[in-house]
Image (tube, rainbow, N blue to C red):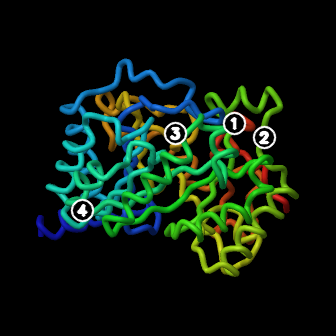
Amino acid sequence: MISALFRRLQNRIENFLLNSVGSQRTLVAQFDITNACNLRCVHCYHPHHSNRDGIGLPEWKKIIEEYSGLMGKLRLAPSFVLCGGEPLLSPFLIPILDELSGRWSDARIAITTNGTPLDRAMVRRLSRYNTAFQISLDGPDAIRHDAVRGSGAFDAAMSGLAALQEAGRNARFLAVLSERSSHWIADFFAEAGKRRAEAMNFVRFISQGVGRGYREQGRDRPLGPVELQEAMTRVARLSRESGIHTNTNQPLYALVDPALGAHGQMGFQGVIVDYRGRLKVSSRTDFFLGNILEEGLENLFLNHPIMKSLRSARIEGCHGCVYYSRCGGDRNSSFAEFGSFLKKDPGCWI
């Protein structure tokens, strides 16, 4: 009888935990393993690239252990993104890859890079890991890309892509979608096709960090609702016409086509840890929930009031929207515009 009561209690706890994270099957962990970067992009959402006070390898291993415990309780599968800064410059890259691969041999590990450190030697070092690559592309040619990332950045990134492809690997391109870059969408797809990239992905411009000053100077800005509708419609159309994959599994795309789009699931899926061991709500905003090494990953992820509010769907202006389950609005844009993750997406056009 005691064992039956224990099983019922255990099931209730497990159901509570599962309800806390929604319906996804993986718990994605993004680890910003360094804040250092060899480029100085004018729209970067980081305020600086000093790696001062960055945690060491023992601390990263402790965080990975806490992630393992949380993932096990939630009965979810592992998935990882290594980010920065520029993760390929981190001395912890290979040890962390060894740690993740040793624990979860089949886990997918994505590396988000500017592409410039990739060469044949680096590709050989990474060949034994189950890694995927995404290369940031801020212009569809050297002139436009280098205007954002610095002279020579485009050619170096394309050389990195070539090194991957020579080794039988590939990468996706990722561009920031802003007022400035929205005029180049067709050119981005053409370049992705020319370079045989796996995909041409886009994320919206978020005015955080250095990017906030870039917007205040009038050099670029996020797209307004009508502009964003037109740009997203163009992205979806050009992807279909070219046969080049793009990431339409994002908020607002359901408004373009009900067959597209996905809820951002912020508050449910995603553990984002910065270079100092702090848990973030999202990868592209500067709001920190707390330090994992001091307060614990499980505690912050499950119990922080902001995470609870996001999971309860208390989004101002979205209540009753028929698209909510496949949209939810972009919480990064909400925070950048209003200082709150719980406001309506400023790019929503309905």
**Which residue in the structure is indicated by mark 3?**
305
Residue 207's disc number: 1
Residue 10's disc number: 4
Q: CA distance from mark 1 to mark 4?
A: 44 Å
* Viewport quadrant of the C terminus: bottom right
Q: CA distance from mark 3 to mark 1?
A: 24 Å
Which kind of residue does numbered mark 3 sit on? Pro
Horizontal and vertical percent for residue 221?
78, 40
Q: Secondary structure at mark 3?
A: helix
Q: In the image, what residue occupies the spot 72% across and 45% down? A: 343
Q: Is 63 displayed left or right of 39 in the figure?
A: left
Q: Are marks 2 and 1 in contact (CB under 8 Å)?
A: yes
**Which residue in the structure is indicated by mark 2?**
221
**Taking the image as drawn, is residue 40 in sight?**
yes
Horizontal and vertical percent for residue 136?
54, 50
Which kind of residue does numbered mark 2 sit on? Arg
